[in-house]
Amino acid sequence: MKKKLLFLLCALLLNSSLAFAVGGDGATCNPATANWPNCELAAVPAREHVINTVHIPGGHYSSPYIADQARTEYILQGDITADSTAITVSASYVVINLNGHTITYNETSPGEGVNVGAWNRQHIAVVNGSIIQGAAMSEGTSYGLGNNPVGNYNSDLNGYRPANYMHIVNLYVKYNGRDVAGIACAGDTGVLIEQNTAEDTFGFGTLKNRQHGFPAISSGPWSNDAVIRNNTVINARQSGINTAQGTQVYGNHISVNSIDTNSSGVTGGENNVSVYNNTIIGRGVHPIGIYIGSGAHNGEVYNNYIDLQVTRIGTEYGDSMFASGFRTTWGANNLHVYNNEIYINTAAEYSGHWAHTGEPVTHQSRGKGLFIGINPEQTALLYNNYIEFAGDGVAYGVSPAHQESDKLFIVANTIKTHDCHVVLEDSYSGTLGFPLFMGNHFIRTGNNPNYYTIGGKLGGYFDQTARFVDNIYSGGASAESINLHPSGRGIVSVYFGTVLNGEYRYNYRLHDNNGTSSTLLREDFNPPRTLNYAVPGEALEFLKPPTGLKVIFQ
């Protein structure tokens, strides 16, 4: 069994950057792509129900055009400029075909490019053209709603008008009003958002409430079973794509240049979310590649390419912010995070900007590869990810702070850093529950004199517990390169072992005698000791390729 395990782990480590395709190219067919208008448009399912055609004249609209005829395709005959909202849809089975033309909305008063104006509608498609926020640049709510290019929020009605099976496709949308998000569809079932480019041109400034996300593209928070695929997001001011229950997010190319805390390329705050084959370039304040929010269940994150750096700072946390490849820190269950490539640039001194004003400032640029904390009895597997740091700033490979479960398994990842591979405590809290680090390849880069393979970064203030089994160390990384700061405030207890004949057997433990020792003590076990903590099942089914993932626990 041990030979089989080591063979599988070594095969994964040696082929971590070659065994799977990562990243997404984004949109290939809309007015922002190079091959427009000769590219192939996506199929529009709502057309199956269409029996009528109506032509919408171009020109200037002082009030919204009302598309209220069911089973109809409305075809734009020229560009539109609109004082407020350009087009409101109030019937089912409607296709709004921009026909390659441009809508410029919100020229003088609040309104959307295309919105929904009635309850309980379904099969509404908006396709094939450009929608641009106009000169008024009216601002949105604290949730980024209102004055959006397209979606089902209606400023005149001051709220959503949910519509099942909305389809937003082959559009270029551009927006720049304060607290305005991009494509905003929520409260729906079966939303499909594909082949769009969403460009945020806001630049520097502030948000009413940074907790709310301000996405370029959103299917949340009350939708079900959305698909967001093959879109391009350019310079989102906080988040690229926000998801809802059952959302699939794939094939997208997302760039974030955030102006406030908790920005992310993809945010999955609900259950049954799949995020795969995306490219995420994160800059600005506190960029996070992919964030699975607290309380979410059944998240799957794989084959994503993530490139991050903190390039701006804000007033909330100054330059103590970290860029994080993958994050969940307040509890989420049954997560599978695998086959992702994460690159983070760091700098002890970076010439960046204040996010609110754009003024130049020199600040730290820090990074964390995997930043994960789950609650007791919750499960998370993070495996076969490739994580690499550049620069000379603070760079944590894995930080399982604020985690309390023995079912956190960090397996067969390749991590290159000049700072610290595993951080068992930081400002978010410590590491309880004895998470398992197994078969990872820890590679030290550079010659930072403050480097440690395993460390605590808050002076021993919180508890630090973990298990290390059959990990590989190179470049100066070592199981002996440890700095855990026994202090009497938090407990230190870290086990080291191997798998032998299918059993997890531990040879020694480093500890502080339940918080009573100011030096790190070593306790050897002869014969090796077994522990009553969760381990992956003997079948090692979590090492199978993507799809149909299943985990067995002993």
Image (tube, grey):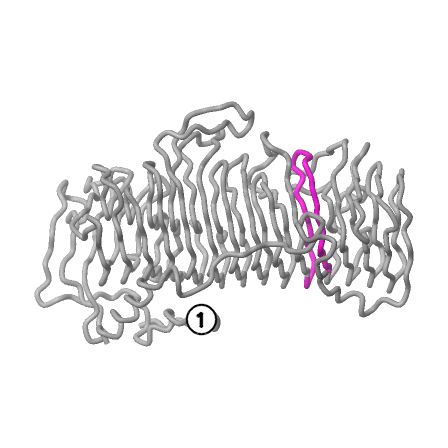
Q: Is residue 170 magenta?
A: yes
Q: Quadrant of residue 128?
A: bottom right
Coordinates of residue 165 in the picture (x, y in percent): 72, 62
Within-10-Å neighbours for mark 1: few <14, some 14–19, many 20+: few
Coordinates of residue 64 in the picture (x, y in percent): 87, 44
Name the residue beneath numbered marker 1.
549
User: In the picture shown, does residue 295 fall above or below 486?
Assistant: below
Residues 176 and 215: in front is 176
Classify mark 1: helix, strand or loop. loop
Task: Judge whether residue 221 can be spotted in this image.
Answer: no
The residue located at (80%, 44%) in the rendering is 103
Coordinates of residue 361 in the picture (x, y in percent): 45, 24
Residues 331 and 447: in front is 447
The residue located at (63%, 53%) in the rendering is 220
Q: Residue furthest left?
A: 526
The residue located at (74%, 51%) in the rendering is 152
Coordinates of residue 131 in the picture (x, y in percent): 75, 45
Q: Quadrant of the N terminus?
A: bottom left
Q: Is residue 441 magenta?
A: no
**What is the magenta range?**
166-190
User: In the picture shown, does residue 49 fall above or below 57?
Assistant: below
Tag 1: residue type?
A: Leu
